[in-house]
Image (cartoon, rainbow, N blue to C red):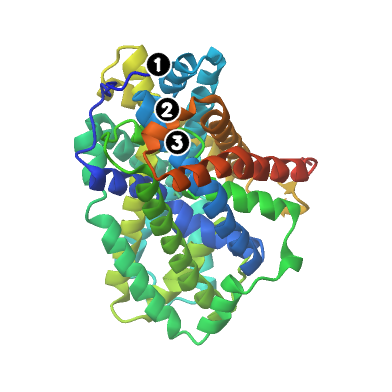
Amino acid sequence: MVDEQRTSIHGQWSGRMAFILAATGSAVGLGNIWKFPYIAGENGGGAFVLIYLLCIAVIGIPIMMAEVMLGRRGRQSPINTMATLAAENGRPAIWAGLGWMGVIAGFLILSYYSVIAGWALSYVFRAASGMFEGVTSDGVSSIFGQLVSDPEKLLAWHTIFMVATMVVVARGVQHGLEKTVRFLMPLLFLLLLILVFYAATTGAFLEGLSFLFSPDFSKITRGSILTAMGHAFFTLSLGMGAIMVYGSYLPKDTSIAKTSIIIAAADTVVALLAGMVIFPIVFANGLEPGSGPGLIFKTLPIAFGQMEAGILIGTMFFALLVFAAWSSAISLIEPAVAWLVENRGMNRIYASVWVGIVTWLMGIVTALSFNVWAFEFEFAGEKKTAGMFDVLDIATANIMLPLGGLMIAIFAGWLMYQQSSKDELNMTESGYNLWLFLVRFITPFAVMIVFLNVIGVLKFE
Ligand code: TRP
């Protein structure tokens, strides 16, 4: 029935720790530090955060386990993994389409992800130059405004980030992907802790915490529920095959359940710490929590400008943010690169460059959407202005990823031989039954309810 001995032609992680680091590197990124605070701010805080946490637990963790499980079973790029597993389980070949949708989602996400990572990169130099010393909230807004209104600058930083991403992906699984995360993630965590201590001295710490943690459900709209669910997928890198392809490099004997829980927990802690840093600064300086994608770039510099050793800490912080983005970015194109190597006989270097160029071109759309191409549209009754950037973000994070996750849950829960998923997950009877229950009933219905609820919410002007 099943081929137990499949191995990946791309290599394997050196062990369980390497997988945890790489998957955590993929999960922890701009999503945690840049996106989470600004969408939590836009959606009114506490209640949104609670829904997001719920989505991580009942949707995110079971789907992460399913993705890793499918990847390790198939041992190939998501497209070929799904084709192989569909055949092995007597299901139609169209399931490979799940892999294709993931490849497209990965392209689209990286195209704007790279532009935002470019912002972080440019802030490394701004922090190092001492530009934030004693800066006011108006000062930081104008520094940020100057950056995003200048398409040349955005394109230059986007280009640098994409080149860096291609270099790591080209070097391949063990050399490229593994080494970037080993030291940098713990360091980022440490800096966040330092910043939480700073935030505690701003005088608005409790106000910030209460914004983040005390739920006010009157602030929740249908759109914010969708955004919370979409973000659970985005922040855990789920729904497009990134975790599946990382799972395909996972050694046979590693526990999928334990590693998934560790990864999800680490990711969540980083996001919550980022929120605990940002919102006290927001309130202490009379800023607007719902001010959108620029939020961390308009708040953190104030903190760095006031604190002891702010130049050093600020420079390190933005540098680590860039590394976190980098270790996420590589996972967004790994599925496409693995497929080109498998099916087009390309070598990794050539495949990475090819994928990188297409993504870079697509990124121009986002770089221009903050300035020359900015337009307004309405999502869930809220006006958005950045145009194509928001459209791409909503189309991928809020629609394609949950849709991918839904199909993963259906395939893993309903269409695969239970013996296969049981073997691969290798858990206790009750653990397996809980997973199966979640993936069969809870996850698909939760995703569908949120989708149905939201139909009619998107309106273009
Ligand atoms: N999870 C990353 C972050 O939070 C982004 C990311 C990397 C991603 N790979 C992904 C998002 C795959 C969705 C799918 O920054």
Which residue matches tag 2? 420
| CA–CA distance in space, label 3 to label 1 | 21 Å
Vertical arrangement, residue 259 with respect to residue 348, above or below? below
Mark with earlier residue (1, 2):
1
Q: Position of residue 113 (x, y in %)?
A: 46, 44
Establish if 285 lies above or below 319.
below
Residue type, label 1: Met
Q: Which mark is residue 67?
A: 3
**Residue 327 in sight from this viewpoint:** yes
Q: Earlier in the sequence, mark 3 or mark 1?
A: 1
Asked if the residue at tag 2 contacts the one at tag 1, i.e. Cβ–Cβ closer than 8 Å, the answer is yes
Quadrant in which residue 277 is drawn: bottom left
Q: Residue at x 36, y 39 (%)?
A: 426
Residue under the image location 51 percent in, 37 percent down: 239
- Residue in view at x 49 percent, y 34 percent: 240
**Residue 352 image point, x, y percent:** 32, 27
Secondary structure beneath label 2 = helix
Q: Secondary structure at mark 1?
A: loop
Quadrant where the N terminus sits is: top left
* 3D distance between C-alphas at marks 1 and 2: 9 Å
Total number of numbered discs in the rendering? 3
Instruction: Give residue 1's mark.
Output: 1
- Are the residues tagged 3 and 1 within 8 Å (C-beta)? no
Q: Distance between the Cα atoms at labels 3 and 2?
A: 14 Å
Residue 169: horizontal and vertical position, in percent? 29, 33
Query: Relative to the observer, which residue lies in front, 209 or 307?
Result: 209
Q: Which one is nearer the viewer's eye here, 158 or 32? A: 32
- Name which residue type carries label 3: Glu
